[in-house]
Image (cartoon, grey):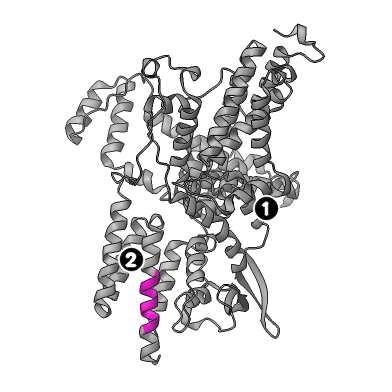
Amino acid sequence: MISPSSFNPVELMYSKEKVDRSEWRKNVLKTNPEINNLCERIYPVNRAIQFGKQYYPGKAEVKQKLDKTVIIQLILQHLSTKGLKQTKQTLEKEARVTTPIVEGSTESRLVTYIRNALKDTERIYDLSMEHTEYTKEERQSKITEREDLLFQMDLLEEENEDDGVNIWDEPAENIITEKVHNTEYDQDDEVVKYGSLNKLVEHLTHDSKHDLQFLKTFLMTYQSFCTPEKLMSKLQQRYNVPQGTDEKSARTIQIRVVNVLKTWIDNYYSDFDDKLIQQLRTFLDQILIKFPGPGSNLMKSLSKVVEKLSPATESKHIFNEKTPEPIVAFKNIFSNNLSFHDIDEEEIARQLTLIEFEIYRKIKPPELLNQSWNKTKLKSRAPNVLKMIDRFNSVSMWVATMIIQTAKVKARARMMARFIKIAEHLKTLNNYNSLMAIIAGLNFSSVYRLKYTREELSPAILKSYAELEKIMNSEGSFKTYRGRLQNFVPPMLPYLGVHLTDLTFMEENPDNIPIEVSKGKSVNLINFTKRTLVFKVISLVQETQNVAYNLQPVHQIQEFLLNIKSDLKADTLDLYQQDLYKESLRREPKRAQRSDIQ
């Protein structure tokens, strides 16, 4: 026995006796997984490997592109940049793959990809670290930032809303309706206010109730509370009627399911990706056995969906009336130096309208749900809404820039008058979005302050501008503009900003409502009243998308308008406006007299 006084750990550590320490690290890490985990998190490469394991398989499109040949090509290009010709030639011969030629690049693409991967994983790691000095708000901010980053990298899947309850087992009380008097038909209609997903789908395919308005509202807004795959699964559950159900009732329910599918496919074909189409094909095999006629019609609708989703398919508009001739000056239209002054005001309005309507008509209902255009996680769902917003800002900045960069006051007034004339033509075309963009540009503080420039405008131009501003005035929640929408004659391009604001206010209502369905029992039900309000806004968008403008595109003018830009550089709209304001002060300094202005 060793006494405490004789125990010397330092002496033992440096004992001359040989001890095999080769397996120590391995054994320690094996018996202490928490230490192994810590080591893996400490080193960047190990962290990247662990990250890859956790989020495997990552982006689907990356997996599809990174096949064996692509990986070998990356290795070959890496060997080439390192000057390892013999090794590269051996690999080319054995793999039967040639080295890709990357023009203007001397850096290894493989190294670049690995460096970027390490950078991304380090950002995730940093946002995942918790420090004792962080406040609760700072920790939550880190978590939110990390989730946003993971969503941008397509590494987080949305939560599955499945509550595990079969549609046929859902409690009867999990839907709330009310009677509302329909003045048009002088009758009381049953309107759904709240309900579980199962009960909403049940109401959609009820054997004794056929609510067409509910069907329209549901199919337009369901993606705010349910994925397309989940809806398909619920319709399949509903179709599989339990044994013992009245035969007539069962058949009616199944036919209703088929009808819902037909309406869904015909009107919302963009909801269907390859995965959902395959799910539908499997379902169709079952439907065709019992309902060969309706099933065949569904097959035809599905074939049209596949055709519409094909990249080569492009919708064409057919007009009954003759398309008006473009107003162009042929001596300038083909010039490489085509300028703003070479193009007629009405033709500028026409081409602006065609450009924006082409973006506008591509907006799908899901883009307008859940404020997708405003949320980092959801922006990928609203590409066309974001394009419309960017286009609006570009036109507004272009208007302000063109005016402010005109040096002489009289020429500047002519430029301002020209934009007002274009706005007048936009009003005639019912293009309220571009009209508002021009008014917004004219109301930039940098333009609005140009007192002496405005004094040069003719009374007729000033009167025209006052009338345009009155139409697009925000007073009374754009009361005048909304009044013009009541009895509009298509085609029309609404001012999207107003309707996005409406949807934003509606989003303040909760998605789900806790409802006491029985004594002492409360259930969170989908707020379908909110979806009914959202439906009304999106319906206007859909309605105005259906009738296109019967105008002739002029390629040269559209190219010019698509490339509108300014010589003033700034990273954001606010900084850009600050630069414009500085330039505006140079044109008309504060407290300057008219005689001081050129």
Disc 1/disc 2 C-alpha distance (Å) = 78 Å
Q: Residue at x 30, y 27 (%)?
A: 77
Foreground residue among 516 and 141 = 516
Q: Position of residue 441 (x, y in %)?
A: 63, 29
- Predominant secondary structure in magenta? helix
Question: Horizontal placement of 195 versus 302: left or right?
Answer: right
Judge by depth and name the residue closer to the eye, 273 or 387: 387
What mark, if any, has residue 2 been given in the picture?
1
Vertical relation: 119 (above or below) 169? above
Three-letter residue code for mark 2: Leu
Q: In the image shown, does 49 or 35 lie closer to the viewer?
A: 49
Q: In the depicted view, which residue is nearer to us: 22 or 77?
A: 77
Q: Which residues are magenta?
A: 252-260
Instruction: Based on the picture, tell me whether residue 255 belongs to the magenta stretch.
Output: yes
Q: Residue at x 50, y 45 (%)?
A: 492
Element class at badge 1: loop
| Residue 238 numbered mark, or none | none
Which residue is painted at 65% across and 31% down in the image? 465
Quarter occupied by residue 334: top left
| Local SS, label 2 | helix
- The verdict on residue 561 being magenta is no
Q: Which residue was labeled with disc 2?
A: 280
Crowding near the residue tagged with mark 1, few <14, some 14–19, many ≥20 C-alpha atoms within 10 Å: few
Location of residue 155 in the rendering, given as x and y in whole percent from the top left corner: 48, 49
Of the image marks 1 and 2, the number of the one nearer the N terminus:
1
Residue 253 at x, y = what percent? 40, 81
